[in-house]
Image (spheres, rainbow, N blue to C red):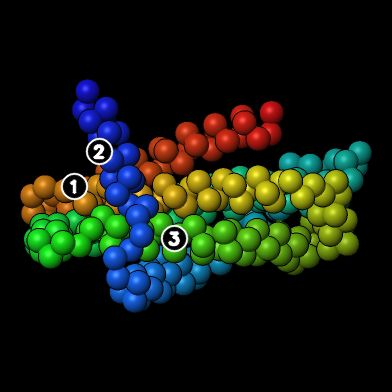
Amino acid sequence: MVYLEHLGKYFLMLSRVFKKPQRQKLFYQALMKEMEDLGLKSIGIIMFISFFIGGVIALQTALNLDSPFIPDSLIGFAAKRSIILEFAPTFCCIILAGKVGSYITSSIGTMRVTEQIDALDVMGINSINHLILPKVIATLFFYPFLILLAMCLGIFGGWLAGVLSGLFTGTDYIAGIQMEFKPFLIVYAMIKTLVFSFLIATVPSYHGYYVKGGSIAVGRASTQSVVWTTILIVVANYILTQLLLT
């Protein structure tokens, strides 16, 4: 029953999120701030992890396909598929869920325990719309670009790792990348990214908005939000894979 209560409160919250902002100028300023906090400040960690994980994927693929009967071009093909299908959209969004989700919950939760949200409600402002809608739009707009960047850097990291290690040539790797390229896989990754971005913005916001207690409760809510966001991303990943690829 507790889970049903949370589910109902979550969807009731969403019904108040998607309404026309009461003050367009303040909404635009909040949107720009959220794009900086949730998007621009996450570029560094995504670039760093994508580059090195792409190299690790290529090296491990090369070491496990060490056979004279298997062409080296399959290394680039396997690395490309792994990065586009799973690593970039799923793994990077789980990382963002930990980094961004805890920030969203703690910032909104602090406003709740310090009664700033109550002050917004007293002034007649739709606090849910005011606080959460800019976060939703910022993640839905910015995270697809982050994931595309992660794909490019991951594939480049794999190429560079192979060239520097000597396990395979850059020409074979590029040939594998070009082998059986399906544009729908990019579309599939972008669909997953949009769903995951929505979860990253709304689930932590829910935990922060309805937190009760003091600073300790905010810390617990931040932990719970990261855990539940990660669980929902994994479940959504399975469902979307079943719907779109099978």
Earlier-in-chain disc, 3 versus 2 = 2
Badge 2 crowding class, 10 Å Cα cut-off, few under 14, some 14 to 19, many 20 or more, is: some
Q: Are marks 2 and 1 in contact (CB under 8 Å)?
A: yes
The residue that disc 2 covers is 9
- 51 vs 16, nearest the viewer: 16
- Name the foreground residue: 136 vs 45: 136
Q: Residues within 10 Å of mark 1 (few under 14, many from 20)?
A: some
Q: Closer to the observer: label 2 or label 1?
A: 2
Give coordinates of residue 203: x percent, y percent.
34, 46
Quarter of the figure that contains the N terminus = top left
Q: Which residue is mark 3?
A: 137
Q: Earlier in the sequence, mark 2 or mark 1?
A: 2
Specify whether residue 72 is in view.
Answer: no
Residue drawn 47% across and 52% down?
197
Q: Amino acid at mark 3?
A: Ile
Task: Determine which of the numbered discs, if any, sits on residue 210 in the image.
Answer: 1
Would residue 191 be found to the left or right of residue 219 on screen? right
Which amino acid type is shown beneath numbered disc 2? Answer: Lys
